[in-house]
């Protein structure tokens, strides 16, 4: 089969791949974005997301977007149509232990710490911005041999011969030449649902560390997006409970700070693992977003880091004639190495440090939270790292 020439093929139109296609606008490169799901599927999911202000249906995953991600999404013209809820403060504490800290936007010289948006809404907003990239829906990249990518589409098979293939497929594809990714199963599942509490959220997010895993409540519309992490067996039990029993279990784990838990939307479960590609430099392909590194959702870093991948790749591509060259790919890897490593280490150490009941560690964690509460510069350092990454965007 003849392969069509193209400068850049993006395999995967999730939020990171979709953002990359927009960021490449004006680079002078011809771009094809191949998304496995059909256009109908992405639109239907987004229509479901429209109900997110009261109780989202479908994929209930909500994402915390940092303030820096908002700045990028604005430049991509994808921000204004999105439904978002601002996060003004974050309360961090541990269950049955001393120490807590409150991080506020004022600590870090930003108007707000971030925003909560529905995954589907974010993806659809990015895919709705007009751009010159050719977007193919229902087009699954089924193989890539270093020169040629084969796609399965609704009309049959197609082939492309790109200068550069960017894997943005959330690591669901086998790039035939890629070294095996490092992978660590956290033996944890994130139970996700929209919930409403007696007390209004007033822009505050809660991160509560329990011995089973972190429990986060992110302000989302008139309630909260819950991300409750625990071992898979307990998660399956909680997912099967009737709503009043589920709300009572949540109340018992979170405590009384928000009064009673009154309402819960559909529950979804996400198994959690750390997975990242080793930093090998090959010609003609690289990975961004979850395909490059899949992180634990604690501290809400995954998409924000992936967006910085896309932004940096596009920035370099604007100045490059051959984005498939070893030189280009090496420059990209060097530019992203520090931020990637920092994101991986930060989330992985948080999981290790907080997801256990060792009394000595508990004492250390309490002291750490107390110190953070007393030291504004430490809060500022950590919060700005979470917002802007290990290397600030221009
Ligand atoms: C419970 C949970 C909570 C989270 N909370 C946060 C948060 O608060 N903040 C944050 O920043 N991150 C968060 N994350 C992480 C975030 O969801 C991911 O980092 C983000 O979705 C990565 O986007 P992506 O586009 O790289 O990959 P994905 O979202 O996985 O998208 C991949 C896309 O590729 C398509 N695809 C797959 N295979 C192929 C193929 N062969 N050919 C073509 N297309 C293909 C898929 O259909 C999909 O559209 C959370 C994750 C979980 C599980």
Image (cartoon, rainbow, N blue to C red):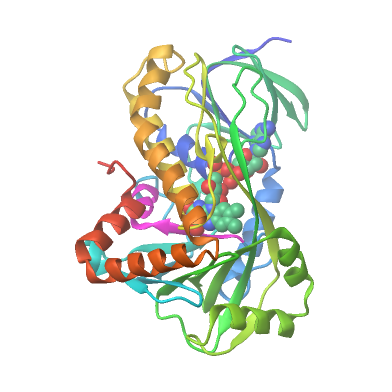
The quadrant of the picture occupied by the N terminus is top right
Q: Is residue 179 above or below residue 73?
A: above
Residue 131: x percent and y percent?
A: 47, 37
What is the count of numbered marks? 0
Residue found 50% across the figure and 42% down from its top? 16
Q: Is residue 244 above or below residue 315?
A: below
The answer to which image quadrant residue 226 occupies is bottom right
- Magenta stretch in the rendered image: 61-73
Q: Is residue 281 left or right of residue 56?
A: left
Query: 373 or 53, which lies in front?
Result: 373
Query: 289 or 280, which lies in front?
Result: 280
Residue 118: x percent and y percent?
A: 55, 61
The answer to which image quadrant residue 229 occupies is bottom right
Q: Is residue 5 left or right of residue 372?
A: right
Query: 258 or 375, which lies in front?
Result: 375
Query: 216 or 136, which lies in front?
Result: 216
Q: From this viewpoint, which residue is outermost toward the front?
A: 360
Q: Is 71 inside the magenta-drawn segment?
A: yes
Residue 122 seen in render: no
The answer to which image quadrant residue 333 occupies is top left
Residue 298 seen in render: yes
Q: Is 134 inside the magenta-drawn segment?
A: no
């Amino acid at each position: 089969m003849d392969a069509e020439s193209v400068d850049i093929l993006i395999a995967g139109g999730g939020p990171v791949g979709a953002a990359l296609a927009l960021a490449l606008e004006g680079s002078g490169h011809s771009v094809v974005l191949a998304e496995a799901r059909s256009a109908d599927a992405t639109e239907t999911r987004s229509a479901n997301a429209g109900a997110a202000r009261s109780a989202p249906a479908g994929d209930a995953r909500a994402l915390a977007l940092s303030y820096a991600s908002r700045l990028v999404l604005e430049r991509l013209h994808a921000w204004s149509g999105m439904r978002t809820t601002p996060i003004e403060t974050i309360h961090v504490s541990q269950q049955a232990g001393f120490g807590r800290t409150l991080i506020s936007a004022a600590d870090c010289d930003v108007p707000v710490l971030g925003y909560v948006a529905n995954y589907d809404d974010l993806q659809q907003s990015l895919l709705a911005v007009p751009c010159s990239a050719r977007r193919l829906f229902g087009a699954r990249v089924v193989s890539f041999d270093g020169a040629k990518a084969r796609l399965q589409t609704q009309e049959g098979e197609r082939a492309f011969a790109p200068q550069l293939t960017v894997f943005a497929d959330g690591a669901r594809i086998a790039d035939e030449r890629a070294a095996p990714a490092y992978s660590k199963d956290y033996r944890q599942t994130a139970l996700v649902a929209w919930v409403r509490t007696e007390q209004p959220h007033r822009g505050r997010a809660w991160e509560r560390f329990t011995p089973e895993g972190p429990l986060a409540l992110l302000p989302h519309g008139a309630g909260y997006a819950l991300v409750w992490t625990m071992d898979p067996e307990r998660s399956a039990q909680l997912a099967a409970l009737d709503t009043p029993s589920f709300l009572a279990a949540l109340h018992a784990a979170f405590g009384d700070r928000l009064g009673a838990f009154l309402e819960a939307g559909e529950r979804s479960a996400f198994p959690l693992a750390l997975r990242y590609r080793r930093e090998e430099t090959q010609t003609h392909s690289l990975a961004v977003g979850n395909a490059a590194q899949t992180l634990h959702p604690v501290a809400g870093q995954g998409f924000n880091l992936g967006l910085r991948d896309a932004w940096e790749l596009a920035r370099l591509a604007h100045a490059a004639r051959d984005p498939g060259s070893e030189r280009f790919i090496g420059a990209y890897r060097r530019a992203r190495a520090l931020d990637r490593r920092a994101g991986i280490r930060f989330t992985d150490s948080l999981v290790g440090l907080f997801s256990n009941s060792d009394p000595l560690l508990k004492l250390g964690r309490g002291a750490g939270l107390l110190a953070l509460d007393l030291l504004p510069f430490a809060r500022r350092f950590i919060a700005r790292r979470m917002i802007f990454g290990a290397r600030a965007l221009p």
